[in-house]
Image: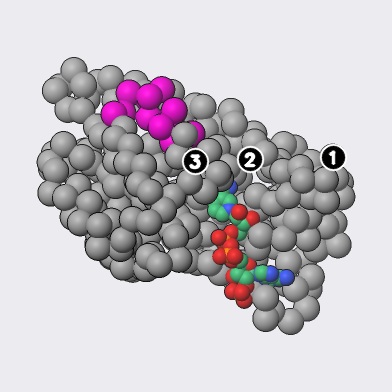
Amino acid sequence: MAELIDGKKISQEIKDELKEKVAELKEQGISICLAVIQVGNNPASTVYVGNKKKACAYIGIESLAYELPEETTEEELLNLVRELNEKKEVNGILVQLPLPKHIDEDKVIKTISPEKDVDGFHPQSVGALSIGQKGFVSCTPAGIIELLKRSGIEIAGRECVVVGRSNIVGKPMALLLLRENGTVTVCHSRTKDLKEVTRRADILIVAIGKAKFVDADYIKDGAVVIDVGMDRDENGKLCGDVDFESAEKKAAAITPVPGGVGPMTIAMLMHNCVESALMSQE
Ligand code: NAP
């Protein structure tokens, strides 16, 4: 039976460390502020934004909430982002995705100042990551590295297989594993014989958005399995991309859904906000 990698517990540790750091910074007269913009009222986005605001309040980061109507034009949103870029007291700007269809997400992301890009989605942040320079790292993959490290799982020299190549999870995940000296393979929907590749993995990271797709057949005995998926099963219950019941019989360690990668994403967002404040002092 696999050991459970407890993202809830590890994310709480990180939030408590950040809370202490933020209190110290406050004593030095440095306060931290995250601006969160939501356009429209997508119910999932409302839950995510609510969780982010809650985490800010817990850690002692001020949050400015902008809840804009669905009909907001692209120009109105871009103007708000530009305004926040200029505000000295705002350290981080987060635009909750997805945006309504009439707004170009790439344009919005590019308008956020790279110094305030706490989501790590700006092309400059992504470029910095790919050439090993300092910059914000996308929160979900950064959280996975933290999960592995804090669980005592060695990355260097190991076979790491990432299933999924999205800009927010798969690609930055591969770059981060490479930075940690893993031997990295990236799979996607056109990969031939996926099982053959995933069975080589010492560390298998699955981010495809398909409920319970990866079962024990895809997993090498003793592998570490990280499930990024946030899907719904046939009964509408939250589940991951990995079939947990079957996978845990073969894996040495595995993340559950919920309570695995999800809570780490918010913890790393908070981490990036603190980093942003520290960088603005430099
Ligand atoms: P995405 O943008 O839809 O990308 C999915 C990726 O999976 C694509 O690269 C796709 O390949 C690949 N894929 C799809 N079906 C496949 C298959 N049968 N075999 C191999 N590869 C396949 O998704 P995402 O944004 O990366 O998110 C993935 C999952 O993670 C979702 O469930 C999402 O909800 C979850 N998520 C969780 C968090 C969190 O905080 N826990 C954060 C972000 C995302 P192609 O490129 O060839 O199409």
Determine which quarter of the picture holds residue 281.
Answer: top left
Residue under circle 2?
Answer: 260
Q: Was residue 57 drawn as part of the magenta stretch in this picture?
A: yes
> Who comes first in sequence, dot 3 or dot 1?
1
Q: Is mark 3 within 8 Å of ligand 1?
A: no
Residue at x 29% of width, y 29% of height: 62
Residue under circle 1?
Answer: 1
Left/right of residue 39 with respect to residue 199 in the rendered view: left
| Comparing labels 2 and 1, the label whose residue is closer to the camera | 2
Figure quarter occupied by ligand 1: bottom right
Secondary element type, mark 2? loop
Residue 127: x percent and y percent?
A: 33, 68
Q: Is mark 2 within 8 Å of ligand 1?
A: yes
- Evaluate whether residue 57 shows in this view: yes
The mark found on residue 249 in the picture is none
Q: Is residue 63 above or below residue 256?
A: above
Give the residue type that dot 3 points to.
Thr
Residue at x 37% of width, y 65% of height: 103
Residue at x 83% of width, y 51% of height: 234
> Who comes first in sequence, dot 2 or dot 3?
3
Q: Which residues are magenta?
A: 51-62
Give the residue type that dot 2 points to.
Gly
Alpha carbons under labels 2 and 1: distance apart: 17 Å
Q: Main secondary structure of the magenta part?
A: helix
| Comparing labels 3 and 1, the label whose residue is closer to the camera | 3
Residue under circle 3?
Answer: 46
Instruction: Name the quadrant of the C terminus.
Output: top left
Determine which quarter of the picture holds residue 137.
Answer: bottom left
Instruction: Name the quadrant of the N terminus.
Output: top right
> Who comes first in sequence, dot 2 or dot 1?
1
